[in-house]
Image (cartoon, rainbow, N blue to C red):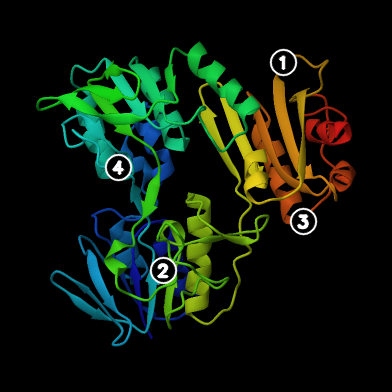
Amino acid sequence: MKYVIIGGDAAGMSAAMEIVRNEEAANITTLEMGSIYSYAQCGLPYVVGGVIPQTEKLIARTIETFRNKYGIDARTNHEVTKIDPDSKHVYGANFEIPYDKLLIATGARPLVPNWPGRTLAGIHTIKTIPDTEVLLADLKGEIKNVVIVGGGYIGLEMAENLALTGKNVTIVEANAQLAAIFDQEMGEIIHQEAERKGVTLRLKEEVKGFEGTDRVQAVVTSSATVPAELVIIAIGVVPNTTFLEGQPFHRHENSALKVNAYMETNLPDIYAAGDCATQYHRIKKLDDYIPLGTHANKQGRLAGLNMVGKRRAFAGVVGTSIIKFFDLSLGRTGLSEKETRDARLPASSITFDGRDIAGYYPGAEPLKIKLVYHSETNQLLGGQVIGTNGVAKRVDVLATALYQQLTLEELLDLDLSYAPPFNGVWDPIQQAARRA
């Protein structure tokens, strides 16, 4: 059996390793359009901030390890330009490779609109190690004012890390708030933290273009011209699936490949996983697109197992994520109130101000919690938690509760750990549930 995998990062190499573990002397070819395999994209902002000393620290396994230790034909600088599902071949500029089973794990690329001046020097995206190396080299110049376009995951992380290096940072965001995955009252806490740390916010402003001769000098928005010697565009990503145009794949509205629970596309013997594929959302009960490293690794692993005939279904996602933003941790899972309205679910919510540990114990810190629940059944639909400590613990409990479809009453029954240095006798998420 000849396995071909397009893409050499999280999903692709997770699949390759599962094939290696489950099929003796497997014939695996992986095709990576770049020169680096298996690295932690989520760590890139922290290299820029100097928290992680160099990009090499983010590489999980080298190409030589895949080749020499695991026997994978791991190729670099091999960009696939076409596939032929009928003859079962993949094609590039200088190669043609047959397959029996094919995995498409091509990830996603940063979204960059056709703004005037977008090709000026000093305008960056951050998605790969080479992107980051170019940005680091550029930051060695006379850079004082940095504008970040977009206030999502990458925008917030880059704002923090660049501010920590002494840059004047401005975030331009078209929405009324940063981190639109949070509801408005939670977003206000994020705004306060940004302003406390000296980050300038320009909300409800759309980028119209960039000014400069050879290098960017300003960002032109719907309201102002903002000086900038360096710009980072972080407004989201789009799936890397354009090379499949003309093929009869079933697709999501953003061109991600639709897959079933076994990571199979609608074409025989072709699988997809990671940021180029959809993820089933357990609460929405439909195919969604939430491109995160956790999902890519899980989907890749299951794709590998299913490719070797070990049927294992992907259980789906509930939209769990956490972001570090200066002194705050921003965690959420499930649906926000806005998402329940979009899904036409009858929902109510409760917002609770608690403490991360017992209130009488030294060092107790505020914890803002919002629970969203079904108005008729009291089933938990989502949760948002913001604070300096203890956020991850609560978000992970809520994510587990969502997987088990618990109601608020059942949330109160959970036997959660307690000692004054770690928690109150009632966990704050249970206190919120009681208030609801």
Camera-near label (1 vs 3) is 3
Residue 34 in the image: above or below residue 373: below
- Residue 362 in the image: x percent, y percent? 76, 14
Say whether residue 434 is visible.
yes
- The residue under label 1 is which amino acid type? Gly
Where does label 1 land, which residue? 363
Q: Residues within 10 Å of mark 2 (few under 14, many from 20)?
A: many
- The residue under label 4 is which amino acid type? Val
How far separated are the C-alphas under marks 1 and 3? Answer: 33 Å
Q: State left or right for residue 260 relative to residue 25.
A: right
Camera-near label (4 vs 1) is 4
Camera-near label (3 vs 2) is 3
- Residue 136 in the image: x percent, y percent? 25, 30
Q: Quadrant of residue 272?
A: bottom left
The first of marks 3 and 2 along the sequence is: 2
Q: Secondary structure at mark 1?
A: loop
Where does label 4 land, which residue? 112
The first of marks 4 and 2 along the sequence is: 2
Pointer 3 with pointer 4, Cβ within 8 A: no
The first of marks 1 and 2 along the sequence is: 2
Where does label 3 land, which residue? 404
